[in-house]
Amino acid sequence: MHSWALDREEFDRLTERLADGDYTSDEDLEEGRYLKSYVGKTGFVQLGWAYQGCVFVYEAGTEWYEHYQHLRELADDSGGFLIDETGQSGEP
């Protein structure tokens, strides 16, 4: 099982990268601010299980998570990459 929720730090990094980006529009910035209402909420869930020798995977994502992914790609393309600051042990 895997899930993803938007945390405050990730939201702040994304909006900062969008504001600093060379190719982002006012519409993209507004869409980034729109995501603020989803801080702390789960946007994506993935479940996997084995049954009779087959592995099944179910994924579900919200509409706002798709917007988040789109904005993250824009931020990556317009000014570098968003870096996950956690180490392999999961600690910052």
Image (cartoon, helix red, strand yellow):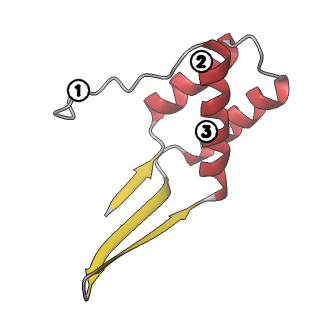
Q: Observer-nearest residue: 3 or 9?
A: 3
Residue for badge 1: 87
Residue at the image point whose x is 74% and y is 27% from the top: 29
Tell me if 5 is positioned left or right of 11 in this view: left
Residue type beneath disc 2: Glu
Mark 3, other Cα within 10 Å: few <14 / some 14–19 / many ≥20: some
Residue for badge 3: 36
Specify which label sits upstream in the sequence, 2 or 3.
2
Mark 2, other Cα within 10 Å: few <14 / some 14–19 / many ≥20: some
Instruction: Look at the numbered disc 2 and give the secondary structure of its residue.
Output: helix
Specify which label sits upstream in the sequence, 2 or 1.
2
Tell me if 82 is positioned left or right of 75 in this view: left
CA separation, marks 2 and 3?
Answer: 13 Å
Residue for badge 2: 16
Instruction: Look at the numbered disc 3 and give the secondary structure of its residue.
Output: helix
Q: Observer-nearest residue: 11 or 46?
A: 46
Nearer mark to the viewer, of 2 and 1: 1
Callouts 2 and 1 close, C-beta under 8 Å: no
Quadrant in which the C terminus is drawn: top left
Specify which label sits upstream in the sequence, 1 or 3.
3
Tell me if 52 is positioned left or right of 74 in this view: left
Where residue 44 appears, x then y in whole percent?
49, 57
CA separation, marks 1 and 3?
Answer: 26 Å
Residue type beneath disc 1: Gly
Where residue 52 appears, x then y in whole percent?
25, 89
Hey, which quadrant is residue 75 in on the image? top right
Residue at the image point whose x is 52% and y is 66% from the top: 60
Quadrant in which the N terminus is drawn: bottom left
Callouts 2 and 3 close, C-beta under 8 Å: no
